[in-house]
Amino acid sequence: MSEIAKRVLDGCAVSGGRLIRWLEDGDSRGLAALRVVYPRTGHAHLIGITGPPGAGKSTLVDAVIAELRTRDHRVGVVAVDPSSPFSGGAVLGDRVRMQRHATDDGVFIRSMATRGRLGGLARATFEATVVLDAMGYDVILIETVGVGQDELEIAELAQTTVVVSVPGLGDDIQAIKAGILEVGDVFVLNKADRPGADDAERHLRMMLHLRRAAEGAWLPPLIRTVAPRGEGVEDLVEACLSHHAHLRESGRLDAVAARRSEHFFREILRDRAADEILRAAASTDRFAGLLEDVRSRRIDPYSASDALLAAFEPRFEDADGERGASS
Amino acid sequence: MSRRIRVLLAKLGLDAHTIGVNVIAQALRDAGMEVIYSGLKQTPEMVARTAIQEDVDVVGMSSLSNAHMVHFPKVVALLREQAADDKLVIGGGVIPEEDQQTLLDAGIARVFTMGTPTREIIAYIERWAADRANAGDARAERARE
């Protein structure tokens, strides 16, 4: 077994930090270690925390860590912030709110920049959760970037998705169009000591009531919190753990895990296939010519793609003699 | 996917001045680096653990309240203890001339005092990263032979 994989499975922080780094950077040493640790993962409860910028997600995560620690959970955290589209750099400041856990052996916090990925997660958030799981963290909190309306990939990754709202967001329209109601398993009204909190709560409850619910389905609770004071946080943690128990008891936990695996398999395949095709295409004269034509608007990008892909035949060797590509 | 330089910026000691560290954070970001900012009043233990969890390439510590002589060397020692000392550790802030050699001897690679242009810091980090990448390539080359 690779040395780093073994140390990650032993919970070594230095090795865990390094393996996440390799996976994030696409370093081949990371893939070798991932191969070893991956079959031993899949045990952690992944809780996503999402909501608009300024909703107080980091402070809430800090309070949730504290509550989980009183219950003897080992807590991993992946906190995502956006990369600058101009420089590719980023300032990742979520840790500032979580400082009190910095020297707790039962807490491992990793900040991640999106690196151009859309959807509210970073390029390697999934990979980081696998590593934290392998290190023995049994609850993993994933704080998304401040999301708008359709950046909800977190629901594919986490078993429990917590949607954080705050008073005064112009709720009426926002809540409906966000699609955010469909993905939430637990709803939080944070900053519930602010003016307008009662109105916001009433509105959210109404929207949740309008959700269609099947027989025996989980009914998402709405919890009021004031994160800096820890108010409501015990209830929030209780709700997240209850949701996990509900998934287990209703036999849905396996289905959720299977869906996550399929989602990230398809995502990774798509990324790598696109990279490979682009790399191969970019070295051809045909690509250079078509690119020139696209730039000068002699040809539209779709026709140019067709022209290029006409010379490209994807084939899988084990496809029983049939075309392996899409029909 | 490609490698990006990751930098931890931490403020040690009791001062609450954040303007300088913010200016540096933004300059490093604009140079394409990922900057983890961990906040005020960090202890050496917090800095070392954060550097390990975040697996940064560079640890940049700032002190404006005379915490540097004890705290900066302590961070280096803690990283060594955990065999996580393959990082560039630099310091800045209000550091008297006569303290600098002691810090360099303790394993701080470079001390940037007040008024250092950010481009100088960026150039220093980039040069270090390029040197390390070259050394890594040479090592890989030897391993293949």
Image: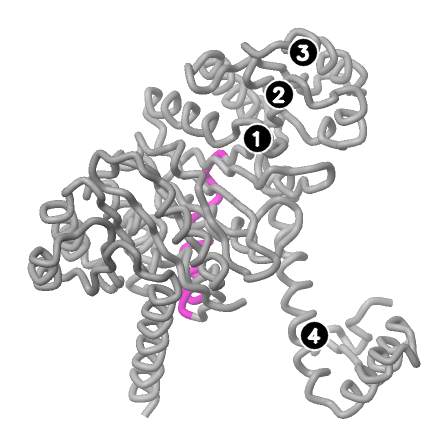
Marks 2,3: beta carbons within 8 A: no
| Residue type at tag 4 | Asp
Q: Within the image, what quadrant is residue A325 found in?
A: bottom right
- Farthest-out residue, front: B115
Three-letter code, disc 1: Gly
Q: Residues within 10 Å of mark 1 (few under 14, many from 20)?
A: few
The tag earlier along the polypeptide, 2 or 4, is 2
Up the image or down, A202 lies above or below A213; here it is above
Asked if the magenta segment contains residue A30, the reply would be yes
Q: Mark 3 and mark 4 in contact? Answer it, CB < 8 Å.
A: no
Q: Amino acid at mark 2?
A: Val
Can you say whether A306 is above or below A123 in the image?
Answer: below
Q: CA distance from mark 3 to mark 1?
A: 18 Å
Subunit ID for the residue under disc 3: A
Residue that numbered label 3 is attached to: A201
Label located before the other in sequence (3 or 4) = 3
Question: To which residue does mark 2 refer?
Answer: A166
Percent across and percent down for residue B118 are 38, 61
Q: Main secondary structure of the magenta part?
A: helix
Q: Earlier in the sequence, mark 4 or mark 1?
A: 1
